Image (tube, grey):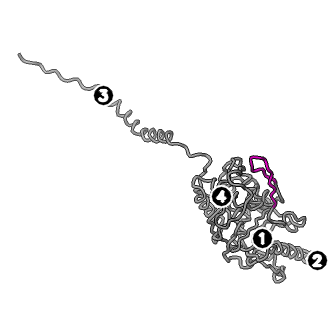
Amino acid sequence: MSRTLLPCPRPQWQSGHSCWIPLLAIVLVLSPLLFTSSACVSRPDRPFAYPSAAVPKPYVNASAPALDAADLWSPFGTPRRAWSLREHSSEWAHLNRAALNVQSASAMIVDERGNVLYAKNPRVVRPIASVTKLMTAMVVLDTGISLETPIRITADDLDRLKNSRSRLRINDTVLTRREMIMAALISSDNRAAHALGRTTFRGGTVEFVQAMNRKARALGMVNTQFVDASGLDPRNRSTAEDLVKLVRAAANYPLIREATSRAEMILHPFGDGTALQYRNTNPLVRSPEWRVEVSKTGFLNEAGRCLVMQARIADRRFYMVFLGGSGHLTPMGDSNRVREWILASNRLTAAR
């Protein structure tokens, strides 16, 4: 008996291959997106408390320019020429520079348009001590991190290099990040500065110092190096010329202007509510003869007495840097000499 072989039926998926091909193509195109999306969902997010320090982000928390609007913009709404240091300006050609007896080892006086009135060893690299804290504050503010986050002072914030003192007691001090910035800038508290460097980035102080140096490069501070957030390490070094750029940049931050021009403040860092009064380390902010807008002092044996300022004299804005002063009040004396020198020059010009 012969057997009739019947043809095997074609699989269903083969019979409609013309319909399956476009669908297969769509799946192939979308599959990488689907896998990528699922990977993103399953990966834990980085905590918001630790922003990225990859790129300097200038003036995140700045709301006002360092210069007046007339200095920054032309009448047609376009930016004026880029700000840069100009050593020979006809505007100040009448100044008698020989009459200015500056005692600091390095100094530089510049007006708001970048005209250099006076320079003494402006490119000599020197330790800058607590002037460092201006950069510390800028790096914190650039991140946009919350200023209301409470920070505790821990044993990690002890100064084991210079054994400097602080009234912020270990494990008993809790201040907001804003208050830590104020304490670091007004009274130059080293534990507050170190705590800021320790807690701003996930990578701690190491990542923070890297961000400080990137910020310096972004500001054109080519002869500046930072190795800590407080300035206790004498390897924090810069020049008078570079620090003019630092002061000008710092003036763009309202909190820095508020803190460094303030005469004093009161904080309550302890659980028992004890009040601590802080006074500005720059006595010129308490003088009625001065209109200080930004300032920071610094001292180490290796650095001498240092002072950087932005101040108004005779309705003009000036940047002043004094480094390597030998006496306790040398930078303040130099500041007063500069002020009288500018005022005398203005009176002489007006009398002509």
Name the quadrant containing residue 160: bottom right
Amino acid type indicated by mark 4: Asp
Q: Point out the tag, 3 or 1, that comes first from the N-terminus.
A: 3
Residue under pointer 2: 351
Amino acid type indicated by mark 3: Trp
Instruction: For mark 1, give the secondary structure.
Output: strand
> How much space separates mark 1 and mark 2, taking CA atoms?
26 Å
Q: In the figure, 15 relative to 93: above or below? A: above
Q: Are the residues at dot 1 and dot 2 in contact (C-beta closer than 8 Å)?
A: no
Instruction: For mark 4, give the secondary structure.
Output: helix
Q: Point out the tag, 4 or 1, that comes first from the N-terminus.
A: 4
Residue under pointer 1: 320
Q: In the figure, 28 relative to 128: above or below? A: above
Left or right of 334, for residue 25: left
Residue 176 on image: x %, y %: 72, 49
Q: Point out the tag, 1 or 2, that comes first from the N-terminus.
A: 1
Residue under pointer 3: 13
Name the quadrant containing residue 250: bottom right
How many callouts does the rendering have?
A: 4
Name the quadrant containing residue 109: bottom right
Q: Which residues are magenta?
A: 266-279
Mark 1, other Cα within 10 Å: few <14 / some 14–19 / many ≥20: many
Residue under pointer 4: 157
Instruction: For mark 2, give the secondary structure.
Output: helix
Residue 304 on image: x %, y %: 73, 74
Foreground mark, 4 or 1? 4
Q: Residue at x 68, y 50 (%)?
A: 151
Q: Are the residues at dot 3 and dot 2 in contact (C-beta closer than 8 Å)?
A: no
